[in-house]
Image (cartoon, grey):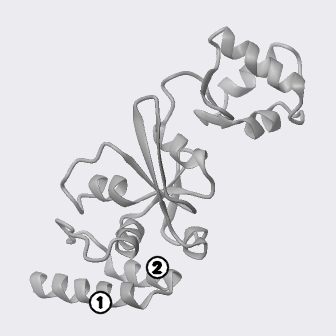
């Protein structure tokens, strides 16, 4: 790769957030001191933006949902972030909520990222997780189940748009009797209201 092509190869990518490993792969060179020096050079010149250690962006206008799934992997956007977007709850949440292998809350560029722990078997199961614009995002049915899994008796504002067939397709990945009982109860309540 010629000298001027290193930065161009990043700028041409569809991604807005890059890990150190991503950049080494794009540049076709292993993570070496030369890679670190080149990255440091581009950051000092303002041609790349360092979000935090090991994570970089083309500029400060990176996709925050994409970053959310790059901080800790495996992970995907879920819970209130999806529930609000899909109209299942009406409260506004500033935090971006992410399913992960750990519980943690961090702040980056005035944005709070709230990671909530799911058991690994459910976390890595791709059922009900879509890949949109370099980001893994739960469907409303998966976010609904993730939320009930970690918060029993969660209050939803609107379950009219939930596809119960998809809910029952995803439900077995959690292997959780309490969750099954709660989902069946909500299903009966939702059907009673709609009839």
Residue 25 pos. (x, y %):
81, 38
- The answer, for residue 14, to whether it is visible in the render is no
**Could you say whether the residue bearing mark 1 is in a helix, strand or loop?**
helix
Residue 154 pos. (x, y %):
25, 71
Which residue is painted at 24% across and 88% down in the image?
Answer: 185
Mark 2 residue crowding within 10 angstroms, few (<14) / some (14–19) / many (20+)? some
Residue 23 marker: none
Residue 170 marker: 2
Residue 86 pos. (x, y %):
29, 58
- The answer, for residue 150, to whether it is visible in the render is yes
Residue 119 pos. (x, y %):
55, 73
Which image quadrant is residue 16 in? top right
Residue 184 marker: 1
Labels 2 and 1: the sequence-earlier one: 2
**Could you say whether the residue bearing mark 2 is in a helix, strand or loop?**
helix
Query: Does residue 20 lie above or below 95 as drawn?
Result: above
Marks 2 and 1 sit apart, C-alpha to C-alpha, by 13 Å
Which residue is painted at 20% across and 69% down in the image?
Answer: 155
Which residue is painted at 89% across and 33% down in the image?
Answer: 29
Query: Does residue 194 lie above or below 150 as drawn?
Result: below
Q: Quadrant of the N terminus?
A: top right
Which residue is painted at 34% across and 69% down in the image?
Answer: 144
């Amino acid at each position: 790769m010629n000298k001027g092509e290193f930065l161009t190869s990043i700028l041409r990518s569809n991604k807005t957030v890059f890990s150190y490993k991503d950049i080494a792969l794009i540049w076709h060179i292993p993570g070496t001191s030369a890679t670190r020096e080149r990255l440091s050079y581009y950051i000092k010149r303002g041609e790349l933006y360092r979000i935090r250690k090991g994570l970089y962006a083309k500029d400060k206008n990176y996709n925050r949902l994409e970053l959310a799934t790059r901080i800790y992997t495996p992970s995907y956007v879920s819970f209130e972030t999806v529930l609000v977007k899909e109209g299942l709850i009406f409260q506004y949440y500033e935090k971006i909520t992410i399913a992960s292998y750990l519980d943690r809350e961090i702040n980056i560029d005035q944005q709070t990222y709230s990671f909530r722990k799911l058991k690994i078997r459910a976390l890595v199961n791709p059922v009900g997780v879509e890949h949109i614009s370099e980001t893994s995002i739960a469907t409303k049915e998966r976010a609904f189940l993730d939320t009930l899994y970690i918060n029993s008796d969660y209050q939803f504002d609107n379950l009219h748009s939930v596809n119960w067939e998809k809910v029952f397709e995803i439900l077995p990945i959690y292997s959780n009797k309490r969750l099954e009982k709660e989902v069946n109860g909500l299903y009966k309540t939702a059907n009673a209201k709609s009839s």
